[in-house]
Image (spheres, rainbow, N blue to C red):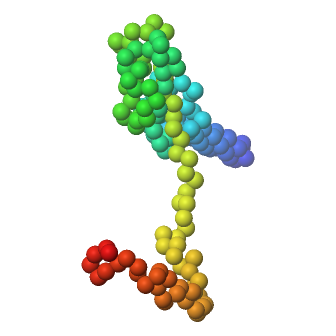
Amino acid sequence: MWIGLIVIIGILCAGYYFLKTARSGKARRAGVMRLADIPAKVPNPSRYAGIKSVAAWEFMAPNLSTACSFARKHDRIRMSAADCTPLPLADCGSKTCECHYRPIIDGRKGQRRLDSDRRTAYRMDNGTKAPDRRRMTDRRRENAGWDDEHLR
């Protein structure tokens, strides 16, 4: 009797745990947008504003001969997701509007230079006391053509 009750409680606890983790996983996936979630042609980039690797959105008008004046004016212009106008426009003159936005990916992987001051890496005396290789004498011909204040 006690064994049956413990087994039923164990099954109920396992079911509750499974349902809770499945719901939190769906909520997590729905809340976080990834780069793979972006379709090839985006009509409204404000829906994808939360993706951090997208640096900007580029307006693309594939066929400028049949495009409206807005498309001709904004073709290949990059802007933030907040500045993008949702497509298709209400006053678009084209019957088959092919305009869309293309994401511009931030291609930087990280900080390019490890040191902000690279001079120590390229000095001849980094750590060792090597003699100074610079000449202390002027290599020019006695400053030919120069006076104290004027050109000769």
How many circles with numbers are drawn on the protein?
0
Q: Quadrant of the N terminus?
A: top right
The residue shown at (46%, 85%) is: 138
At 57% from the left edge and 27% from the top edge, which residue is drawn? 40
Residue at point 45%, 38% (across, down): 56
**Residue 39: percent from the left, percent from the top?**
56, 27
Residue 81 at x, y = what percent? 41, 35
Q: Position of residue 150 (x, y in %)?
A: 28, 75
From this view, report whether residue 105 is shown above or below residue 142.
above
128 relative to 46 in the view: left or right: right
The vertical placement of 80 against 118, above or below, is above
Task: State whether residue 69 is above or below residue 81.
Answer: above
Residue found farthest to the front: 152
52 over 144 or under it: above or below: above
Left or right, residue 44 beside residue 40: left
Hey, which residue is sitting farthest top in the picture?
95
Q: Nearer the viewer, residue 39 or 94?
A: 94
Left or right for 51, reference 150: right
Q: Residue at x 40, y 14 (%)?
A: 68
